[in-house]
Image (tube, coloured by chain):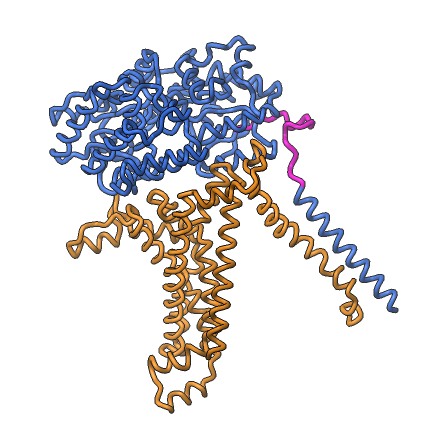
Amino acid sequence: MLTRERKRTQVVTFLGLATAGALLLSACSGSSPAGGSTGAANKEFTYLSFAENTSIKDTFTSLSTGSCSTAEADAKLKVDNTPQAAYDQSIQLKAGQMDLPSIFASGNSPQIAKDIESSGALVDIGAELSDMGLEDAIIPAAKSTIEALYDGKVYVLPTEFNVEGIWYNKQLFAANGIEVPATWDDLVAAADTLSAAGVQPFSADGQDGWPLTRLVGNYIYRSLGPDALAKVADGSAKLTDSEYVEAAQKVADLGAKGYFGPSVNSIDYMTAVNQFLSGDAAMFYMGSWILGNFNDPEANKIGNDNIGFMPFPAVEGGAGSADQLAANVGVPLAMSKSRYDDGAKQWLECIAKNFGAQSLKDQGVITGFKVDGDVGEVPALTQSVQDQIATTTQTVLWFEALFTPKASTTSQTNASLLVTGGVSPEQFMETVQADLDAG
Amino acid sequence: MTHVLGDRRAIFMLLAPALTVYSLIILVPVIWSFGYTLFEGNAIIGFDYVGLQNFQLLFTDAHVREALSFTVRFAIVLTIVQVLLGYGLALLYVFVLKKASNLVRTLAFFPVVLPTVAVGLLFQQLFESAPRTGPVNGLLNVFGIESVDWFGSSTTAFWVLILMESWRSMGFYAVLLYAGLVDIPDDLLEAARLDGASGLRLVRSVVLPLSLPVLLSAVIFSINGTLKIFDSVLALTNGGPGSTTTPLTLYMFQTSFSYGQYGYGSSIALLLTVLCLVVTLFIFRSARRDLTKA
């Protein structure tokens, strides 16, 4: 009896252990990457997008039914989304698990793509395009921006090419007798006049911080020259040097006078856009991607004709000049080597040839690709920005472009404190420099 | 059955599956994370052995000092406020509302079941100063006081966080402490009343000493919960303005997953674990001493 009971106990425990083991094994075994040896998986061209960015995926979808239908027949486009705030974590995990999608937004900081590239997981897009005879598919200005961002290499696609500057309300300028400012002093004088007339001079997204630090970065480029922040990145200059602190001081002075409006730290991106588009603020520093919003008649209450664009003004006696526009490549896309099969290759070729025209036609977004073919009617403001890009020979990056992710976060989260007097310009620069020094 | 449970091997065999699962999903990651403290890097670029460098960094990193200071201040203030409020509510249930306390208990408990993010958004709207004026600033304006930018300074943001968390959790501590208070025998209270004790005197001399064990549990719950605060801060201030309301947990999360420094992130996690352990041991020890004295 006892023996039988013991035997039964052993059987039960064995079964228990076996079940637990099986569960654990099934939990530990992830899905195998689609780029593996299974033939069926190669039939997909997966794109991982920022959930907030709709223009790229919409352009891809349009391409899949139009110019890229041949590639689509070979590898079907599949779009997945991850919120931008959680994107870096997600892409790092996927890279760690060798499960990167075919093509993906390369993250919030250029450092993410640099890390992935250093592990050898990315397609050398520049070389691939050369092999296809498409060296000139990426316009020179966009190519130089990519090279400046990614240590001289081209392994991302410029789905946007944005120049940044100050958009202004022509009517408010005219009503207050203001000429388009050519220097920083003119800009401050214009803001003084506007503020005295009861008009908020600038609208700014203080919640995200970067539109404020962009001003600091631009001032540095204008006063110290286009290589000023590269010197900080390579350690030959420090943000705590007086000439760099001066930039933070100038922007803090604007904040101290209340030129960014009340509670700027609570203003989010869309609120800042709406403040400008409803005529509540006279100026708005932003990239040309904002043209999409400007071209929307429902959101734009002041009218497209009423908006002007000026490059960030020069600083008198400075080493930089106003024609060195700040530029970026929007959401650069990288491609995974492990999924770079014939289908993905066809898609790359098709994107390089057609993305620029499709995006401009459907979304009104200027990309870093050469535009071939019919783009329909382009709004006048978009056309003027495109013309400005065409005449731009030298571009500069933004304040945090060459920073580590930690220093970027510190810079952007402390930006609103800088303009509300919560931290002094010296403290601001010291904090960011400390994170840069920590590496 | 007695035979089975009397056999050590059988007990081990019965426990083994659960123990294996527990070890694999709790202990292994904990030990793994402890191991990471000696490395730097992440899943993409790989890991390099750096010895005790991460611990050295813990002592020199200004962000850690700021986060630690915020975490400790926040935990102390919030623990005092939420346990006191909870105790006050529990006394109200037992001695004032008595049998009619059901409705108030339910209402006070209601915020506990609300999702943290929803509560965070609610308080963001309540204390908003721009672009719209929130109800709190609206009320201030009625009395001729100018709107306050609640999330624009670390002090005001800190107190809004304390207010939100107290509102959210006092119902929980009220129920916890209520359970302790209803356990106090009625005849003991009656005897105290006959001896002339009433009101504050009754609470101080009879109710408080008798509810001390459950009060102690509440304090331990609270201090550990508040030291590890994460979601409320993320939803309400996201650590701002600047990083002035960033607790260790949020800094750990950013370090590991946004900055890709798994090793240093694990070191911050270890610091937090040690902090929780020290505080809990301290409370246990001081409480034991008090009880012996009594």
Residue at the bottom extreme?
A: B194
* Residue B250 position in % (x across, y down): 44, 46
**Residue A95 in sight in this render:** no
Depicted B209 relative to depicted A139: above or below: below
Q: Is residue B95 above or below residue A390?
A: below
Q: Residue at x 42, y 24 (%)?
A: A234
Q: Where residue A288 sits in the image (x, y, percent)?
A: 33, 23
Viewer-proximal residue among B276 and B180 = B276
Q: Is residue B191 magenta?
A: no
Whole-percent x, y for residue B170 in the image: 40, 64
Specify the colour of chain A.
blue
| Chain shaded orange | B
Part of the protein shown in magenta: A29-47
Q: Is residue A46 magenta?
A: yes
Quadrant in which residue A179 is drawn: top left
Residue, far top? A133
**Residue placed at 58% from the left, 18% from the top?**
A345
Residue situated in front as seen by the camera: B180 or A26: B180
Residue at the location (39% across, 45% down)? B238
